[in-house]
Amino acid sequence: MGAPREIHAAAAAGLGARTEVRAQRASKGALGLDVLLGPADLSPERRQTFAVRLDRYWPDLEAAVRELHPDPDTADDLLARLVRTAATAYAERPADLHLLDQRRLLTPDWLQQPRMFGYSCYTERFAGDLLGVAKHLDHLEDLGVTYLHLMPLLLPRAGDHDGGYAVQDYRAVRPDLGTVEDLRDLATTLRGQGISLVLDLVLNHVAREHDWAVRARSGDPTYRDYFHVFPDREQPDRYERDLPEVFPDFAPGSFTWDDDLDGWVWTTFNEWQWDLNWANPAVLTEFAGIMLWLANLGVEVVRLDAIAFLWKRMGTSCQNQPEVHAITQALHAVTRIAAPAVAFKAEAIVGPRDLVQYLGTGPHAGRVSDLAYHNSLMVQIWSMLATGNTILARHALRALPATPGSGTWITYARCHDDIGWAVDDSDAFAAGVTGPGHRRFLSDWFAGTFPGSWSDGLVFQANPATGDVRISGTTAALAGLHDGQPPPDEEAALARIFLAHAIAAGWGGVPVIWSGDELGQPNDPDWAAEEDHEDDNRWTHRPRLDWSRAVARHDLRTVPGQVFSGLAHLARVRAGLPQLHASAATTVLEDTDDGVLAVVRQHASGTFVGLYNVSDHRRPFHLHRLRAAGLTTPYDALGGHVLEVAGDGVLWLPAYAAWWVVDAPS
C-alpha cells in the first residue's frame, strides 16, 4: 500500500520551503493528510519523482512509526512531521546531488562493489583541517581510497568531548577545522574524485551544553522530555542492576545528578553526555532533519553512532532492543524519500549473535542500515594471530547468520576505538577453551605481558568486577612492528600486518584502513601530553599522520613504503575481482589445517578462495579442495601466479601467507 492519497496528490502538485503538513485521523483510523503547499520552483518531473519515492517508502515509514508508537494519534502526527521534513529537504537538495541520487538508484549495489576501499581518520590528525584534507587527496588516491570517513567534526562541547562524540551543535563545524561551506566544498571535491564522504551522527546522546540540554536545565518541560530524568535513585538503581559500564575507570555508573535539572539524568558514556529519550517522537523528528541537512551538504554515508543504546527497557542491558531497528527503519525511509544516494552505517559493537540484526533481519530486512561493523571479524583476526590457530575463528565466523542481500560489512584490522574481546562463550566452548580464559589470554598477549608475545598494546578500561580488559594500540604495535628491530622480526611483523588487512579485504564488504596504519606508524608515545587526552590511552593509536613517513610511501626500501605498497596492492587487486562483490555467499571451510583459514566466496563471475596461514610455520592445503570449490586452474591473484603442487597434491602456504585464489585469467 502506498502513501495516503492526500500526501500523494499534494506531492505530485508541488513542494516548497514553506510546505506545511497537518495529520488528522479519519473515522476508520486511516491516516488522512491535509497538505498546505507554498510556492515551489520545481519541475513536474521533480514533483513526480518525490511522489513516486514517497509512495514506494511510505509502507516502510508507516510500519516503523506504528511499531514505535501504537497510539494512532501520536503515530499520525509523527508521520506527518516526517513527511514534511522529507519534502522540505527534497525541495532544497542541490541539482548535483539529485543527479547523484539518480546514479545511486541505477547502481543500488554501489557499496558492495569490489572497488570500494576505505580510509578513516580524524581531520586534524590527518591534515590539520578540511582544506588540508583536500590538499592531500593524492595520498588517498595512491592508496586506492574510494570511501573516506572523517571522524566527528560537528561542533563538540569545550574541553573533554570524547573525541568529538559529545556534540554541542549538529549544524556547525568545529571552527579549527573550517566552516560548513568548507565541508560542502570538500564533499564536492571528493565526489569529483570518486570518493564518498562518510560522517558521524551521534544518536544516543548530546553534550550537556547542547541547546536541548540547556533548555531542559532552564526548566523547559518540552526539552526535559528529550532526556531520561529521574527525581530520585529508585529507577536508576533498578536499571543499573542490568546495565554494563562502558567506561568503568573514568565514568562509572550510568546516571548523573544535575542540580539544574534537580534530577538524575541518564549518562551512559560520560556525565556530560546526556542520553536522549528516543521514545519521545520529537527526538526522531529532530534527527530526521539533521540527517537530511548532512545529506544536502554532500555526505554520502552517515555513521549511526552508538545505535545499539537508543532504546531503554527495564530489566535489560538497554542495548539491541527491537525498537532500535524500527527507529533506524523510519530514518532510512525518510532519507530514501528525500536523498536516496545516502547510505547508513550502524556503529553497533555488539556480540556476534546481535550483529547481523543491524543489517536488517525479519521484518526489517533491507530497511535499516546498509553497512555494519564486522567487529567479530576484527576480534578473530587478532585471536588467530595470537594463537596461530583458526579453530575458534572458523566456528565463530561460520555461526554468524547470513547478511541480507542489500547490506554488507565494514571490515577492518583496526579502528579508532579500543579492542574489546567479544568472544562468545559458546563459541569458545566449542573450540575447547573458556570464554573468560581466552579473553584474558588475548588481553595479556596484546598488552605484551604473556610469555613470547611480540605485541606492544596498552590495557584500556580493565574492570576487575567483570574481568573485562580491553586493548589500545596501532596495527603496527599490536602486530609486533617496532623501530630498530632485527630483519627476521621485522619481516614477520610486516607479514602479520599484510595478512590482517588481506583477511579483512578478502571478506567482502568495504575494507577500511585506520589512519597511520598504512605507514606502519607505532603507538604515539606522547599520547597523554595533549590536553584532555591524559585519561584515555586510545589516543596512542590515533597519532597524527607522520608526513615524513608518508614521503617514503613508494620507497620499498623503507618500512612505510612496504606497508603502504602492500595495502595499495590489496586495493588494486580487489578492484579487479568481481568475486569480491559483497553479495557473494561466504563459507568458512571446516577440516583445514589448524593454522589455515580458508574462506570460499561463490559469485556468478566465479569462485574465490581466500587462504590465510595465521601461523609462523608453513602449512598444508590440499589442491583437490580448490578444485572441489570450482577452480579449474587455481591462480593467486595477490601473487600473480598459478599455484603449483608436487605429486602429492599438497599446497604449502608460507608463514603468514595470504592467497586470493581464483581461476587463472585466460
Image: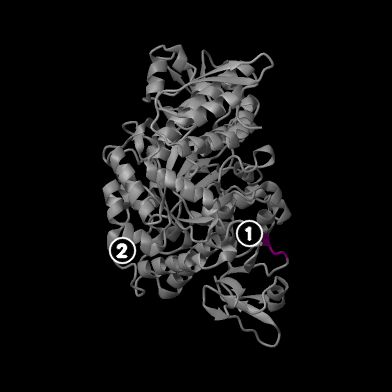
Nearest the viewer among 444 and 272 is 272
Which quarter of the figure is the C terminus placed in?
Answer: bottom right
- Residue 175 vertical position relative to residue 442 in the rendered view, above or below: above
- Dot 1 amino acid type: Ala
Q: Which residues are magenta?
A: 585-590
CA neighbours of label 1 inside 10 A, class few (<14), some (14 to 19), many (20+)? many
- Quadrant of the rendered image containing residue 652: bottom right
- Of the numbered discs in the image, which one, if any, rests on residue 225? none
Q: Which residue is mark 2?
A: 549
Q: Residue furthest bottom?
A: 647
Q: Secondary structure at mark 2?
A: helix
Which quarter of the figure is the N terminus placed in?
Answer: top right
Q: Which residue is mark 1?
A: 584
Q: Residue furthest front?
A: 44
Nearest the viewer among 8 and 600 is 8
Give percent across and percent down for residue 464: 55, 39
Residue at image position (42%, 62%) is: 144
Q: Secondary structure at mark 1?
A: loop
- Dot 2 amino acid type: Arg
